[in-house]
Amino acid sequence: MRNIDVSEITEAVKNLCIDANHTLSPDMEKALYNAADEETSELGKKILEQLKENLQIAGNDMIPICQDTGMAVFFIKVGQEVHFTGGCLTDAINEGVRQGYTEGYLRKSVVSDPLIRKNTGDNTPAVIHYDIVQGDQVEITIAPKGFGSENMSRVFMLKPADGEEGVRNAIVQAVLDAGPNACPPMVVGVGIGGTFEKCAELAKEALTRKAGEHSKLPHIAEMEKEVLETINSTGIGPAGLGGSVTAFAVNINTYPTHIAGLPVAVNICCHVNRHASVVL
Amino acid sequence: MDREICAPIDKEMAMQLRAGDMVYITGTVYTARDAAHKRMAQTLSEGKELPFDIKGNIIYYMGPSPAREGRPIGSAGPTTASRMDKYTPELLDLGLVGMIGKGKRNPEVIEAMKRNGAVYFAAIGGAGALLSKAIVESEVIAYDDLGTEAIRKLRVERFPAIVVIDSLGNNLYERK
Ligand code: SF4
């Protein structure tokens, strides 16, 4: 058994909120730099160069990469040997979000009731996904999610007979519908299998994968590469103004499912695919 | 073609712009996004005046992050324009000449743009740090209680944007 005071969690969350909104992970930054080299359209290249410059300004001058600093989404892996002291874990995470978004000059984009729509003023509450794992450590991953791209995400409850082709078509259709609204180049997170809500969670978590890494399942890795190629041949391009780089990556996570179903979730993320992790 | 334009923008100038033109905007633009549009529509339905004279002006669909000390504004890139489509034709008919945002517009908006000689610009989505450098002054002029969604009067200097839909209805997103 290991005791962790929740004030440590609050401090870590606060720093993650600020870091994730000002600097991209090295793999995402590299994906952008590669794209700028590879893009074939002149205007597309120019836009990618400006996005590179944007990243530099964000890091140097501490201005958020994008004004939509997102709803704070967390994936928390809690080792089952850990005992939290000093308060409730969920409250501690929300307190970290409150401090991070206030002290870090981040935008408060959360409304307390989806219909009454009054801003909570501190970007809480967060959306938190917990997982209980072996060990005595806690891994916290933050993925602040902007809604320009979130709004273009979809869940498809396909039939088993739709098969692999149905899945590919669903992913490509979601990207075509998203077009310029989702601030391309995008990262496309896909969840296949599970239940209605499970596939959506898989898709969201797929967005936190390192750019350039593929699924360990050979048939899924193959699909990731092929669907990415199809997406990049649509010509949507940077900012939706035409070009050869529409997406940086297609990341697919899978889970067993029911004999009667083939759920597919497509969570679209923009080029500001923010995620940062820390292990306590 | 690259063009320098002033805001407010006169109609003749707006009607000369063509989809694909790169523009640098200098002058005054106003910000408004979802909640401010809803309130403006409410104001108009009650027969009251809008909080600023919309004639000849440009609305930037943007809600900034808070400014650090010594800066006029925080990160300040465009938000998705289509969420404002419901309210836009009425504003265009009242004299709104330009809009800056990102993403597609619906046919009703494009019709109203053609009818009124208006233009829709895209700024680069997700380049809020870079774009903030073209904003030299910012002042909340209405709906302060809406926080980031308040209406702001911005002074911009060479704010970069691209004409996506022009007053003839040419649409850069629909090229093939
Ligand atoms: S979709 Fe992403 S890049 Fe575009 S405005 Fe939203 S958070 Fe920013």
Image (tube, coloured by chain):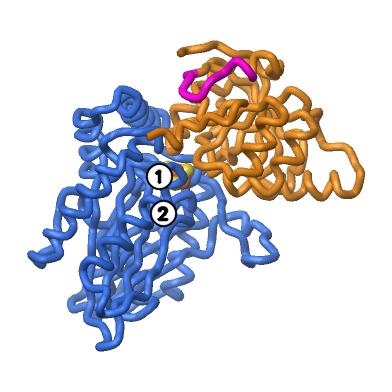
Chain colours: A blue, B orange
Measuring from the top left, give residue A76's x and y in whole percent: 32, 68
**Quadrant of the rendered image containing residue B165:** top right
Along the line of sight, which residue is nearer the eye, A274 or B169?
A: B169
Dot 1: within a 10 Å radius of its alpha carbon, few (fewer than 14), some, or many (20 or more) residues?
Answer: many
* Residue A131 image-quadrant placement: bottom left
Which residues are drawn in magenta?
A: B15-22
> Residue A124 in magenta?
no
- Residues tagged 2 and 1 counted as in contact (Cβ below 8 A): yes
Q: Which label number is shown at residue A21? A: 1
Give the quadrant of ligand 1. Answer: top left
For mark 2, name the chain.
A
Residue type for callout 1: Asn
Three-letter residue code for mark 2:
Pro
Q: Residue at x 57, y 38 (%)?
A: B64
**Depicted A2 relative to depicted A239: above or below:** below
Check the image and name the residue furthest to the left: A218
Q: In the rendering, at what x and y percent does residue A151 appear?
A: 48, 56
Main secondary structure of the magenta stretch: loop
x then y, percent, for residue B91:
75, 37
> Measuring 60% from the left and 20% from the top, which residue is drawn there?
B156
Placement of the C terminus of chain B among the 4 image quadrants? top left
* Residue A41 left/right relative to B111: left
Whole-percent x, y for residue B35 in the image: 69, 49
Q: Secondary structure at mark 2?
A: loop
Side (left or right) of B23 relative to A145: right
In the rendering, which numbered label is found on residue A144? 2
- Classify mark 1: helix, strand or loop: helix
Disc on the earlier residue, 2 or 1? 1
Please say whether residue B59 is visible from this viewpoint. Answer: yes
Residue drawn where x is 70% and y is 28% of the image: B153
